[in-house]
Image (cartoon, rainbow, N blue to C red):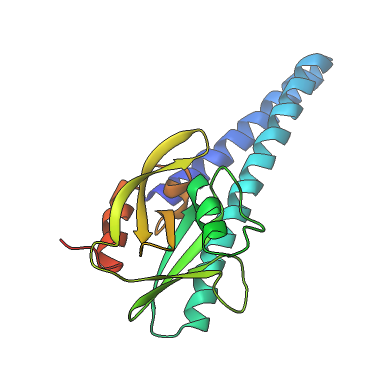
Amino acid sequence: MDRKTLYWAVLVLFLVLSIGRLAVHLSRDDYEGATVWIALLIVIAICVVTVMVVLGRARGLAAHVEKRRPGARVVPAFGTAETVDQARAAGASARKMMPMGGSPVALAVLGDVIEVWVGREAEPRWVVRRTPGGVRAASGTYGTRDVRAVLLSDGSAGVTVVPAYRPLRAMGGGATDDVDRALVELGAPA
């Protein structure tokens, strides 16, 4: 069984058990216990919907960039806290970018430049020129912790991202092998 199937199976099992537990509380006139289970279910539903929306946006952004730049290698990613500062330093807008990281980003590799896309805009937010030694593994601030990330820099513009070939794992900061894959795709020396 793959992880996605296991995730959904556990989620459905938890939902069924929670509804059963809720029914038991209500049948015993334990409204306080029922209230706790209802609150728990609401919190879990909000978390599941939020995760699904973010994952959908990450996948949708990569698909959007692939349509706008046919033939380009596209690296799906999430921005880091550093990404916001790097956007501003490059003269780009940081609108709709979360200051603590986590905003869906896509990098389009085109010849001698790498375009940084945020949202489903018609053009990239900014461009980083490909230079020798300009792509490397680095640390990026993602939420409240430092995670392994990719740094692209040409001396005047840069971007730090957490690659998200597997967005759910990247959201949790656990996609370290995605960093290695992105380094290869972005042209880092082996």
Percent x, y of residue 127: 46, 71
23 lies left or right of 92 = right
Q: Which residue: 48% across, 48% down?
A: 82
Q: Is residue 20 above or below residue 54?
A: above
Q: In which quarter of the image is residue 120?
A: bottom right
Q: Along the line of sight, which residue is nearer the eye, 44 or 160?
A: 160
> How many numbered badges does the structure rendering display?
0
Report if residue 44 is visible in the image.
Answer: yes
5 lies left or right of 39 = left
Q: Which residue: 77% across, 21% down?
A: 34
Percent x, y of residue 125: 56, 69
Report if residue 5 is visible in the image.
Answer: no
Q: In this view, does 161 lie above or below 9?
A: below
Judged from this view, the residue extending furthest toward the left is: 190
Q: Along the line of sight, which residue is nearer the eye, 18 or 123?
A: 123
Q: In this view, does 121 lie above or below 78?
A: below
